């Protein structure tokens, strides 16, 4: 009988494949068209071994029974916090992990020919291998912390492949939108982890399920709401739906496995895993059902006005995933699990076949149905995707970009001057001119810049302040300091920083 500790190989193999390809790419062998075969062989070998390992574990489970929690090693321990490297091997995790590994293997095999002679061939397979490792961790992890590692790997690889054509501004902007939206979900995941440890003292799925029974309903609801926020964002449910339509900027194979077959279902899988906790939070269950229904309606109506294959498939996927959330919200978790597995298989095939559809179909996309065009306002809303993308840009993307600009301004106007970079460079230039380009020793950092400033300006201090009666540089320096303080104050008066302080206050209160 195969030892169940081998389950650690399932996420480890594709992760090592990504690392090996990256190292070989840096070293030289895995570069250009000549290195494509080596990259493809490493990828397919890792993916095949992961799939075969899961098949062997499936057979062992059928013979000896499901082991449940499998402890492989101790990951981290500090005081009361103990995080084991553990995996959950039950019918849900083993079944869905096998399906995910199979879809990954098929997609990677398809990608070898599809991505042939692409400039980013090796970069593409690094991202795909990281994604395979991340999804394996999400599905098989025995605790919330390990699942979060997989959650982040999947998000990182998604960002990499949405921005695959990084020379195009559209690709990088869409990757940024997806990244920012999913960071909101990640914050929810971290909140759920923090509350689980605070109130239950454990992050194991099994311990959390048992411990939720003795917690007050309010506590269970708050903890569940953090994880549900992560699920909503990852599966692009309303109001987080806009990012996924922009994610189609990446190559078709990544669209197939990310947003058609696997990653879009990660939120559904998380809800099913949290079933023992969610049943004790009826308010959160109602919210899940409502947002799932809204997402299904959103995907259904907007899908009617799409004119390309991938967008049509994407909004059909949103509709189906919304129905899965609705089923979870109604307590039909087993129905959602079967729906998830069947839909993932079918949609993967459709996305991979999408390039062929464009060659096989020699006619325009069908017009919107007559019942929709009879309602001009609804038709316009469908064309504009109910303005959710505009709303997301105004509430999330633009404030984040403004925050980044402000941080850069602070760095240029405060931090750089504090460490002495601009002043030291100007002082060195002046000394070079004065001393006929003779070499000078440049001070670096805060201490070095301060010493250089004192050495060069001590005479000027005496000349301008002592001999000129206290005016000159002192007044100018104070005025400059006052200008800096006014500039910082004007930044802090911006609405985005007020909102940031309100959010920080809520986090402290919670």
Image (cartoon, rainbow, N blue to C red):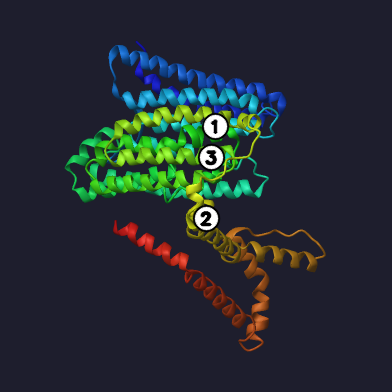
| Foreground disc of the pair 3, 1 | 3
| For marks 3 and 1 on the same chain, the one whose residue lies earlier in the sequence | 3
Q: Is residue 424 left or right of residue 343?
A: right
Asked where in the image residue 331 lies, by quadrant, the reply is top left
Crowdedness near tag 2: few (<14), some (14–19) or many (≥20) residues, C-alpha within 10 Å: some
Image: 433 above or below 234: below
Tags 3 and 2 in contact by the CB under 8 Å rule?
no
The residue nearer to you, when weighing 325 against 159, is 325
The outermost residue toward the bottom is 469
Quarter of the image with the C terminus is bottom left
Residue placed under numbered mark 2 in the picture: 380
Q: Is residue 442 left or right of residue 175?
A: right
Residue placed under numbered mark 1 in the picture: 351
Asked where in the image residue 321 lies, by quadrant, the reply is top left
| For marks 3 and 2 on the same chain, the one whose residue lies earlier in the sequence | 3
Tags 3 and 1 in contact by the CB under 8 Å rule?
no
| For marks 2 and 1 on the same chain, the one whose residue lies earlier in the sequence | 1
Asked where in the image residue 353 lies, by quadrant, the reply is top right
Question: Which residue does the image show at 64% across and 21% down from the upper left?
Answer: 38
The residue nearer to you, when weighing 161 against 13, is 161
Question: Which residue does the image show at 53% across and 33% down from the upper left?
Answer: 256
Please state the horizontal and vertical placement of residue 162, each as a whole percent of the image: 57, 41
Residue placed under numbered mark 3 in the picture: 312
Q: Is residue 221 left or right of residue 292?
A: left
The residue nearer to you, when weighing 338 against 180, is 338
Q: Helix, strand, or loop for circle 3?
A: helix
Q: CA distance from mark 3 to mark 1?
A: 10 Å
Q: CA distance from mark 2 to mark 1?
A: 27 Å
Q: Helix, strand, or loop for circle 2?
A: helix
Question: Which residue does the image show at 54% across and 78% down from the upper left?
Answer: 482
């Amino acid at each position: 009988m195969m030892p169940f500790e081998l389950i650690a190989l399932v996420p480890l193999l594709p992760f090592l494949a990504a690392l090996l390809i990256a190292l070989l790419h840096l070293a030289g062998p895995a570069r250009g068209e000549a290195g494509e075969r080596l990259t493809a062989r490493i990828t397919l070998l890792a993916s095949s071994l992961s799939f075969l390992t899961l098949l062997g574990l499936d057979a062992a489970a059928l013979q000896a029974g499901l082991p449940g929690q499998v402890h492989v090693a101790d990951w981290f321990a500090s005081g009361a916090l103990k995080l084991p490297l553990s995996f959950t091997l039950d019918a849900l995790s083993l079944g869905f992990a096998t399906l995910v590994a199979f879809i990954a293997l098929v997609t990677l095999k398809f990608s070898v020919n599809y991505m042939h002679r692409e400039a980013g061939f090796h970069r593409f397979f690094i991202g795909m291998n990281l994604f395979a490792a991340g999804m394996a961790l999400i599905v098989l992890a025995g605790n919330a912390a390990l699942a979060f590692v997989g959650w982040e790997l999947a998000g990182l690889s998604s960002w990499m492949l949405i921005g695959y054509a990084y020379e195009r501004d559209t690709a990088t902007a869409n990757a940024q939108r997806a990244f920012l939206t999913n960071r909101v979900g990640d914050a929810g995941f971290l909140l759920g982890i923090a509350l689980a440890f605070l109130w239950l003292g454990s992050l194991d799925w099994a311990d959390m399920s048992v411990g939720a029974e003795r917690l007050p309903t309010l506590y269970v609801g708050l903890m569940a709401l953090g994880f549900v926020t992560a699920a909503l964002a990852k599966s692009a449910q309303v109001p987080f739906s806009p990012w996924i339509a922009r994610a189609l900027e990446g190559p078709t194979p990544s669209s197939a496995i990310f947003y058609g077959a696997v990653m879009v279902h990660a939120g559904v899988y998380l809800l099913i895993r949290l079933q023992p906790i969610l049943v004790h939070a009826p308010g959160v269950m109602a919210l899940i059902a409502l947002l799932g229904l809204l997402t299904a309606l959103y995907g259904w109506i907007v899908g009617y006005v799409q004119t390309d294959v991938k967008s049509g498939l994407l909004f059909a996927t949103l509709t189906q995933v919304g129905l899965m959330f609705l089923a979870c919200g109604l307590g039909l978790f087993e129905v959602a699990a079967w729906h998830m597995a069947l839909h993932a298989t079918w949609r993967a095939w459709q996305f991979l076949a999408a390039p062929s559809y464009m060659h096989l179909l020699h006619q325009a996309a069908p017009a919107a149905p007559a019942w929709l065009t009879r309602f001009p306002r609804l038709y316009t809303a469908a064309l504009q995707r109910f303005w959710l993308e505009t709303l997301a840009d105004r509430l999330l993307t633009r404030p984040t970009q403004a925050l980044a600009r402000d941080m850069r301004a602070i760095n240029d106007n405060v931090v750089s001057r504090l460490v002495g970079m601009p002043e030291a460079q100007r002082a060195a230039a002046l000394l070079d001119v004065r001393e006929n380009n003779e070499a000078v020793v440049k001070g670096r950092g805060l201490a070095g810049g301060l010493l250089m400033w004192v050495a060069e300006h001590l005479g000027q201090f005496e000349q301008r302040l002592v001999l000129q009666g206290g005016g000159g540089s002192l007044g100018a320096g104070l005025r400059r300091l006052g200008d800096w303080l006014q500039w910082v104050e004007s930044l802090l008066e911006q609405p985005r920083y007020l909102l940031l302080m309100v959010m920080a206050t809520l986090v402290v209160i919670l």
